[in-house]
């Protein structure tokens, strides 16, 4: 079952922004930490060189082709980090974890991943939403890494964020109407009252990072180019998961002394669908 298809509203969750307290970051700068706390996101970091980015794209292409061939669709690869080697390898890449560590601390859990692949001419968009609304986790300390598999820009439906919207707590939303053609299921109406959107344009092999309270979404891809990204969800181990969501996690760096989070081994291949 997809993480976006269940009702978590009745769970006892602590949903508020927890500012990063890191006075000596190793990879980010103090100014970037301040920007993240104030705006809820960071963007434009290269984590793979051209050769590595091409390899990631080719491996991701094969995974996506297998799912599409099986009739699963381009959005179906949701929380497969325990079954697909390509996703496990990306989630544990040191070049990504170095950035994540400065935001979540030295002990890092990847508990979910999801390819968001808009094929050319895809009429679906992603309505304004907050990630934490969908998740059976508490407290809301997850940082999402958005890895560009393809080059993404305004022409092919890049992600858009509303800076500083994470400072307003958990916002009201409604169930999306089918006419919206929303990839997900929730819509925050009037989100732009919190400020003008910022477009997250990335080259393949670059990442952005955002708080699970940040309001974000994307427009349809009406271009002739694919727009594929992989979201990687990271949190510190003091976060708790409901409904066994901890069973498919990876302790990517450091330790989980509580033993709450699983650390699944590297899958043997990419054959699971």
Image (cartoon, rainbow, N blue to C red):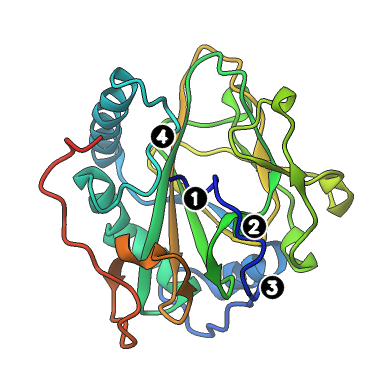
Q: Which residue is mark 3?
A: 16
Q: Secondary structure at mark 2?
A: helix
User: Camera-side residue: 13 or 39?
Assistant: 13
The crowd level at tag 3 (other Cα within 10 Å; few <14, some 14-19, many 20+) is some
Quadrant for residue 16, please give it: bottom right
Horizontal side of 102 relative to 60 (left or right) equals right
Q: Earlier in the sequence, mark 2 or mark 4?
A: 4
Q: Secondary structure at mark 4?
A: loop
- Contact flag, marks 1 and 4 (Cβ < 8 Å): no
Q: Give the vertical position of 17 relative to 22 (above or below).
A: above
Labelled disc at residue 76: 4
Image location (x, y in percent) of residue 120? 50, 15
Viewer-nearest of discs 3 and 4: 4
Question: What residue do we see at 80% from left, 56% from top?
Answer: 172
Q: Earlier in the sequence, mark 3 or mark 4?
A: 3
Viewer-nearest of discs 1 and 3: 1
């Amino acid at each position: 079952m997809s993480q976006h298809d269940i009702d978590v509203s009745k769970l006892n969750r602590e949903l508020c922004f927890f500012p990063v307290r890191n006075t000596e970051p190793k990879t980010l700068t103090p100014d970037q930490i301040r920007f993240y706390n104030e705006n809820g996101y960071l963007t434009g970091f290269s984590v793979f060189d051209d050769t590595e980015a091409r390899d990631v794209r080719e491996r991701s292409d094969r995974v996506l082709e297998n799912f599409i061939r099986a009739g699963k669709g381009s959005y179906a690869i949701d929380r497969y980090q325990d079954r697909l080697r390509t996703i496990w390898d990306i989630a544990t890449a040191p070049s990504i974890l170095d950035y994540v560590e400065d935001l979540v601390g030295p002990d890092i859990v990847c508990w979910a991943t999801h390819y968001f692949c808009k094929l050319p001419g895809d009429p679906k968009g992603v309505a304004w939403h907050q990630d934490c609304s969908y998740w059976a986790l508490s407290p809301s300390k997850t940082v999402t890494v958005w890895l560009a598999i393809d080059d993404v820009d305004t022409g092919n439906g890049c992600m858009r964020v509303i800076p500083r919207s994470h400072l307003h707590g958990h916002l009201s939303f409604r169930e999306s109407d089918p006419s919206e053609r929303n990839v997900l299921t929730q819509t925050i109406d009037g989100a732009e009252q919190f400020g003008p959107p910022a477009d997250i344009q990335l080259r393949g092999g670059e990442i952005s990072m955002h708080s699970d309270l940040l309001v974000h979404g994307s427009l349809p891809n009406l271009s002739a180019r694919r727009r594929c990204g992989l979201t990687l969800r990271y949190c510190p181990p003091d976060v708790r998961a409901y409904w066994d969501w901890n069973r498919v996690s990876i302790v990517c760096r450091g330790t989980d002394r509580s033993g709450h989070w699983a650390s699944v081994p590297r899958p043997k291949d990419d054959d699971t669908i």
